[in-house]
């Protein structure tokens, strides 16, 4: 008996060790950089919870996730937590597709994703972008195979989905779209049992909690029970720079109450400059909250005047976003939007580590050739997914559901972020690791099916949630 106990402890220790290895592999860009990666928005996400305020454009929930992990001491625990969450979800999904997957092979899977996909650059960044892809994996398990999960896993995944949907405004429509399609087609995508009332309530609870949390936060912070009280400013920027909004301003200005009329001849060349530059119209004319008051009128007038032109522009932006996914977009110094918050709220040793990082010094964060490798692997993985999909759908196993969810996510992500914020490589890059994962796991499931191996573990019994 003692020998068996010792052997069990040794096996558990090996599994934990490989789990830790897989997690550390996914934060290598931060180790290479000398500090967790940051983006312009990182300053707001750090400062909201520290300074107790609510920004006009970013929900507070990722800030609240970060705070207990850094405690104004160091941000390293935050990306380590992101890596652990990622590996935990990868392990659970892989165990459903490939029963008996060894811990060492999980680490190998993480290693392939760490080299051949943008995933580590999302894991190692102090941004909520990671949760877009993880949200989809959690939804897949909850919708298609909830009976294979323990009750506590169902509860944790439901809470995680609600958090991920609320962490970034784009995640709510993306998650809702994926959820709707998976529910509608679940019997073709690997489901073997009906959802039941409890399952339907769980799936309804996640987006409902996200919406309620967003509305409550904005009511408390801005006095508006709205999901995005100033989101029309983003739409305004796109309508103006797509053309119809600019035509409305040129035609109707000067118009009483429209602050933008005074800056009409001095608009920056890009929508990003319009929104964020210190000398741009939004900042100069009273901030987003002030500009938001006139945004709806300009948007409605522009769409009413040229609806087809605006629709064509939105579709074009979505298509451009679909093919833009270069790794490393935005990984340059942010002296005005991140550095002041690090200096204000963190100790000297953290400030020195941040200042000495490759990113803060303007050095390349993505090693040469790696971005090209990621693009080639992503395209090959997409081709592999399309080849594997017909057989997976005929087998009606979870591999088909994974591929469908991934392909749908790529489309939704592009056509949510591109038309609303404009095409940026970083938006699509945050989910381009998903086809690589799907090709690897679905390919493994295909090989197992050809060998006659079981591709699904037995369902949990009701008592398994103890």
Image (cartoon, helix red, strand yellow):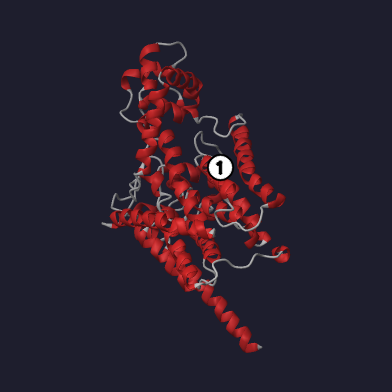
* Viewer-nearest residue: 320 or 5: 320
The quarter in which the N terminus is drawn is bottom right
* Viewer-nearest residue: 54 or 5: 5
Q: How many marks?
A: 1
The residue furthest front is: 394
Check the image and report above or below for 365 versus 213. below
> Quadrant location of residue 365?
bottom left
Identify the element where label 1 is drawn.
helix
Q: Residue at x 47, y 14 (%)?
A: 257
* Viewer-nearest residue: 419 or 421: 419
Check the image and report above or below for 61 versus 12. above
**Residue labelled with disc 1:** 176
The quarter in which the C terminus is drawn is bottom right
Q: Residue at x 63, y 56 (%)?
A: 156
Using residue 276 as the reference point, say whether residue 226 is left or right of it.
right
Percent position of residue 49, x then y: 55, 44
Percent position of residue 303, x then y: 44, 21
Using residue 111 as the reference point, say whether residue 15 is left or right of it.
right
Q: Residue at x 54, y 58 (%)?
A: 396
Residue 364 visible: yes
Using residue 58 as the reference point, say whether residue 332 is left or right of it.
left
Mark 1 residue crowding within 10 angstroms, few (<14) / some (14–19) / many (20+):
some
* Viewer-nearest residue: 37 or 352: 37
Percent position of residue 354, x then y: 39, 53
């Amino acid at each position: 008996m003692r020998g068996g106990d010792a052997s069990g402890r040794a096996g558990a220790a090996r599994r934990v060790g490989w789990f830790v290895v897989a997690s550390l592999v996914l934060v290598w860009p931060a180790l290479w950089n000398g500090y967790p990666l940051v983006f312009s928005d990182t300053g707001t996400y750090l400062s909201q919870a520290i300074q107790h305020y609510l920004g006009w454009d970013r929900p507070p929930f990722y800030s609240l996730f970060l705070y207990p992990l850094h405690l104004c001491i160091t941000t390293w625990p935050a990306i380590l937590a992101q890596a652990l969450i990622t590996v935990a979800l990868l392990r659970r999904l892989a165990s459903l597709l490939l029963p008996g997957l060894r811990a060492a092979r999980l680490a190998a899977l993480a290693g392939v994703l760490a080299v051949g996909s943008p995933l580590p650059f999302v894991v190692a960044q102090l941004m909520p972008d990671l949760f877009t892809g993880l949200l989809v994996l959690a939804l897949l398990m909850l919708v298609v195979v909830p009976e294979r999960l323990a009750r506590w896993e169902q509860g944790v995944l439901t809470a995680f989905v609600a958090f991920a949907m609320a962490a970034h405004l784009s995640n709510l429509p993306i998650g809702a779209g994926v959820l709707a399609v998976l529910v509608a087609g679940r019997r073709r995508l690997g489901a073997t049992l009906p959802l039941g009332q409890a399952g339907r309530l769980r799936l309804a609870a996640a987006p409902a909690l996200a919406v309620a949390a967003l509305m409550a936060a904005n009511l408390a912070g801005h006095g508006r029970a709205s999901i995005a009280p100033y989101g029309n400013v983003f739409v305004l920027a796109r309508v103006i720079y797509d053309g119809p909004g600019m035509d409305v301003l040129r035609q109707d200005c000067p118009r009483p109450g429209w602050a933008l009329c005074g800056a009409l001849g001095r608009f920056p060349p890009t929508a990003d400059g319009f929104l964020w530059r210190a000398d741009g119209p939004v900042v100069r004319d009273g901030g987003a909250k002030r500009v938001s008051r006139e945004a709806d009128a300009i948007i409605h007038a522009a769409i009413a005047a040229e609806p087809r032109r605006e629709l064509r522009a939105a579709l074009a932006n979505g298509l451009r976003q679909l093919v833009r996914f270069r790794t490393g977009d935005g990984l340059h110094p942010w002296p005005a939007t991140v550095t002041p918050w690090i200096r204000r709220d963190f100790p000297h040793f953290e400030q020195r580590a941040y200042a000495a990082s490759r990113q803060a010094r303007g050095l390349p964060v993505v090693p040469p050739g790696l971005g090209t490798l990621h693009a080639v692997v992503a395209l090959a993985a997409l081709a592999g997914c399309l080849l594997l999909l017909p057989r997976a759908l005929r087998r009606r196993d979870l591999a088909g559901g994974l591929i469908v969810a991934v392909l749908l996510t790529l489309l939704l992500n592009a056509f949510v972020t591109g038309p609303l914020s404009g095409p940026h490589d970083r938006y699509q890059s945050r989910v381009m690791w998903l086809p690589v994962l799907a090709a690897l796991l679905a390919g493994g499931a295909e090989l197992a099916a050809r060998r006659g191996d079981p591709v699904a573990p037995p369902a949990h019994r009701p008592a398994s949630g103890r």
